[in-house]
Amino acid sequence: MPMNRKHLTLGLSVALSLALMSCTAAGGAGTKAVASVEFTETPAPKTDMQYLGTYSTSVAKVKYADGSVRDFPLSYTTLFHNTDMTNTVKGQTYAAGQLFDVAMKPIMDPNGDPVIAETADANSLLSVGGKPYLVNHWEYDWLLANGQDAYKAENWYSRSPMTMNVSALNMGADGKLSVNTQTSVDFSSVGGGWIFCAGGPTPWGTHLGGEEDYDLYYVPGEKAYTTTVAGGKAMTEQYFHNTKVANPYDYGFPMEVAVKPGGGYDVTKHYEMGRGTWELARFAADGRTAIYGDDGAYSGLFMFVGDKQNDPKAGGSVYAAKWNQTSDAAGGAAEITWIKLGHGTYDEIKALHDRGLTINDIFSLSLSDPGDATYRPTRAGSAQTIWLKLKPGMEQAAAFFETRRYAAYLGATTEFTKGEGVTFNEADKKLYYAISYVQTSMKAEEGVPTDDVRLPENKAGATLTFDLASGRSDTAGGAIPSAYVPTKAYVEPALLGRPMAADADGNTAALDSVANTDNLYYSEKMRTLFIGEDSGLHVNNFVWAYNVDTKKLTRILSVAAGAESTGLLAVDNMDGHAYIMSNNQHQGDWISTQNKDLTARLEAAARAQWGVNRYDVPNYKLNNSVGYIGGLPGLQ
């Protein structure tokens, strides 16, 4: 979920953990069934410390099946910081956010300082062998220790190879979590990792994360191709130290980490699920159907349907959605049909990968109209039209290595902007999909290859709701073997962003409404859709609770000024406790419309409260935390 602002995101990680107590501990007789959960509002910040901090003052109102109601205040506690020396790799101790090369040696910047990511993203809180483990992402490096923007720093790289942590946690009787041991995941077996964005747990108890291939997506001659060259150079030199040349087709796949009892792990890069700028791929409870968040410009909506439950490597089919618009009012509405792109097993697609393919092996392409009707104009990933002609016998390679371009080539819709989180509501058979901004390619356009989406601009974005169904067929008449096929799309009124003129602080979207929806997670027990913002329109981003029954939207967390909320996850019950996690990124990355006096005041307050490093860089921007809110009772 980078790119809501000029640089992508910095990391304060806030884990909202709602500690579940048994009803006996809470004063009840045994464990009582929960009928509903509602939250009171956390107010928007007013003081400097509230602007600079991450906090919740909400109260969870829990109604039980017997009609009784109890109030449970929520509060925040820190779990660990990105600079805490909690991380052990090959017997050496490092900061939690330290980045590593192919040999798991720490990456150092040109000044000899360790490269420590500030960008905790996805979370999976897993129970493995009866013990709690946390897998978290580091998305990218925002600032060097000397305060330079890593994306712009001289004699440095626009990106760095990224990593994840596996942490073995302690859990107290009251649900309080702490780090027992922690290590960074070694991705050398899959050629390293690139921009680890959102993710979460699978139905079979592992972690599945999105690997966004933003920088590695462009083709020779395309306007943004210099970005791809720079990204390849970063991986080749920083990660491989020139022992191998990175291929763009090495990156952009769902990445699975299976934690073992004791803290070991296995890593799988799921080539058979297709390549893209995946925010994440979220599996439904069937263990076969996954829907992808496709981040970036001119993006699509994609679905994977596996052949075997809880085993995507066994093979499956990838589909792309066609948006058949029925209304442009109230955020828009559409009927959804599905185009099958192809089928493959892990072994089949891995074998194609190992051939070292490039786009020129798959397509003949032209950046201007070749005057040849066998070429098809496409826009996929950027506003630049590229004419494509599939080479003979390359259908499967196109489906899995050029997933978005092949979707456009076959007539699917690639006009969404900033597709982000996805989550399933199993009981109601709904899917929620975050569209952070409704703009550019989602508006009516002329002179474009296709114009399926024709909506009014909304810079505050919208969360789409999709109805799910079984017994559906693809556009070629083939049966789609899933009960989770999105069929209709619309926007519920409370989930449509509301831009406004700037207020005194510089907010340009309503403070009582979601601005630039990003992370989504649905809790079945709480009947609540949790929404995390990544907004350039709010001085402080928020986490919201949307009750799908009452349609009430409630702010439950205020995130440090300039930071984005990431890593949302709801665990309804783990060993008698529940946890809702939400990580923060790029705190101190003030929005462009922020009141200049407020910015100066917050800069001074941050320096006074947390100090500076040896380069006079505020620790506020470099020293971020993972934490949690506790207090919610057991959800049975």
Image: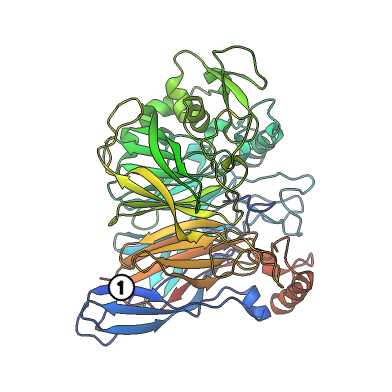
Residue 590, image x, y percentages: 70, 64
Tell which residue pokes out farthest to the bottom in this image. Answer: 27
**Residue 377: quadrant of the picture:** top right
Q: Is residue 250 visible?
A: yes
Residue 612, image x, y percentages: 74, 71
The residue that label 1 is drawn on is 36
| Amino acid at circle 1 | Ser
The local crowd at label 1, few if under 14, some if 14 to 19, many if 20 or more residues have their Cα within 10 Å, is some
Q: Is residue 90 visible?
A: no
In the image, residue 31 above or below residue 548? below
In the image, residue 338 above or below residue 187? above
Which residue is nearer to you in this view: 310 or 8?
8
Dot 1 falls on a residue whose secondary structure is strand
Figure quadrant of the C terminus: bottom left
Direction from residue 500 to residue 148 in the image, left or right: right
Direction from residue 195 to residue 226 in the image, left or right: right
**Residue 549: quadrant of the picture:** bottom left
Which residue sits at x=34%, y=74%? 37
Direction from residue 622 to residue 521 in the image, left or right: left
Residue 108, image x, y percentages: 68, 51
